[in-house]
Image (spheres, rainbow, N blue to C red):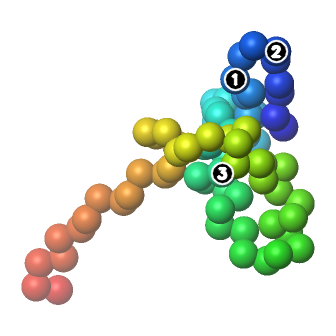
Amino acid sequence: MIAAAPGRPDLVQFSNGPQGSRSKLWSRVCQYVTDPERRRLCINQDSDRRGSEQPGDAFPDAPSIDLGNA
């Protein structure tokens, strides 16, 4: 759900975890929807409303694992 409040940034309520921004929703969900029909249904298509990706929006890269000589 996206909650809009006049004069304040929209807040996105994720199904799990804390609230976030429209750019976080795009970074974590919408950009990965590849099926055109499903992408059309994404509630966050307007790039002007979501803005640019902010630090912390995307999931962090997993740390590298040294497998040695496995």
The amino acid sitting under disc 2 is Pro
Identify the residue position indicated by label 1 in the image. Answer: 9
Query: Farthest residue in the top direction?
Result: 7
Q: Which residue is mark 3?
A: 26
Q: Secondary structure at mark 1?
A: strand
Q: Position of residue 67 (x, y in %)?
A: 18, 76
Q: Quadrant of residue 50?
A: top right
Could you tell me which residue is drawn at 65 percent across and 62 percent down?
A: 31
- x, y percent for residue 21: 65, 34
Image x and y of residue 15, in percent: 76, 42
Measure the alpha-carbon separation of dots 3 and 1. 15 Å
- Residue 1 falls left or right of residue 62: right
**Tag of residue 6:** 2
Please, which residue is most extreme toward the left here?
Answer: 69
In the picture, the quarter occupied by the N terminus is: top right
- Residue placed most toward the observer, 60 or 3: 3
Of pointers 2 and 3, the one earlier in the residue sequence? 2
As measured in the structure, the alpha-carbon distance from the residue carrying label 2 to the one carrying label 1 is 8 Å
* Residue at left offset 64%, top offset 33%: 20
Which label is found at residue 57? none
What's under tag 1, amino acid-wise?
Pro
Q: CA distance from mark 2 to mark 3?
A: 21 Å
Image x and y of residue 69, in percent: 10, 85
Marks counted in the figure total: 3
Q: Which quadrant, please, contains the C terminus? A: bottom left
